[in-house]
Amino acid sequence: METAVEYEKAFVPEFPSRIELELVSDCNLECVYCPRHYVEDLTNYIDLDLFKRLIDEAEPYPDTTLVLHRRGESLLHPQFVECCEYVRGKFKEVQIATNVTPLIDKKSEAIIESLDFISFSIDVPSRFDVTRLPAKYEPVEKKILRFLELNKGRIRTQVSMVQTAETPLDELDVFKENWKDKVDRVRIYQEHSNDGNFGSIMGGRFPRKPCMMPVYEMLIFCDGKTGRCNHDWDGPPMGDVTQNTIKEIWTNDNYADLREQHRTLKITDPVCAHCDSWYPEIGVQGTGQTLEQAVSGS
Ligand code: SF4
């Protein structure tokens, strides 16, 4: 199998080239399609000292892409501005996504000064008020437009939404048309689960190929436990950064075993085994489930 050959040749860097570092697992919204409804105890905030220690460990690897969000709303962190300031200028790319509702000028300015990319998670106007509870479309749109006014094109911007069976198809073009001249990228994700289990909608992708995520990405939850990737919501931890360094976890037996499972396509890991969001190439999922319109930049 071609991808297995690629996997054999894949160079596992001494440090993950992409780290998703969750600042907050808590969220102020109850979006109807969010897998968080099926996960217990998502109410945590990363300790600032732990955050700084992890950034200090990653800093000698400036080519790392750092993603400062995962299961919750990062802008709720009481020390969010300090977190932004601490990463400023240290990495090739620092990204964040937000549901927009906690965005105020002070946080916008910290993001613009310190990060490289922001994604605003919204919905088409006709669905927003019933999917992104209890937020309302108009104030959220105003906040995005205010951010764009402050940003003046300095960091790259994206507006994204999740397309579900209830999304009116004719509104997708309206959505793209409305945002394409305002942000750098408009992205429409297909809903990938509706019962907390990945693969529950698409029903699997065949033939199964090894996933490249374990050779380039690490997910660190805000309590210090580490997961596989952004499709891992509460799987058995791969490690714990309160006990070990990032580098120790990246080279531990759990990772060696997971990579071997993917290389041989004998995947028994409880998260990866049922996942249909695997990445056959580094950074490329290639499912055809995402409509992406690169309007400018990125
Ligand atoms: S198979 Fe799925 S869960 Fe496993 S590492 Fe790849 S994307 Fe993540």
Image: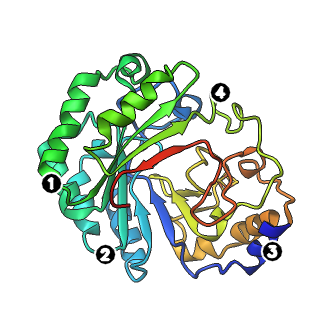
SS category of the residue bearing label 1: loop
Q: Earlier in the sequence, mark 1 or mark 4?
A: 1
Asked whether disc 2 touches disc 1, contact meaning CB atoms under 8 Å apart, the reply is: no
Circle 1 residue? 152
* Lower sequence index among marks 2 and 4: 2
Among the two numbered marks 3 and 2 on one chain, the one whose residue lies closer to the N terminus: 3
Image quadrant assignment for residue 60 = bottom left
Residue drawn 44% across the image and 73% down it: 64
Q: Earlier in the sequence, mark 1 or mark 3?
A: 3
The residue sitting at 25% across, 52% down in the picture is: 80
User: Label 1 vs label 4: CA separation?
Assistant: 40 Å
Left or right side of 263 for 121: left
* Circle 4: element type: loop
Label 1 environment density (alpha carbons within 10 Å; few <14, some 14–19, many ≥20): few
Q: CA distance from mark 3 to mark 4?
A: 34 Å
Q: Which residue is mark 3?
A: 5
Callout 1 amino acid: Lys
> x, y percentage for residue 171?
43, 24
Q: Left or right: where does residue 141 sit relative to residue 97?
A: left
Name the kind of residue labelled 4 in the image.
Asp
Q: Which residue is located at x 78 percent, y 77 percent?
A: 8
- Look at label 2 and name its amino acid: Lys
The answer to whether the beta carbon of the residue marked 3 is less than 8 Å from any atom of ligand 1 is no
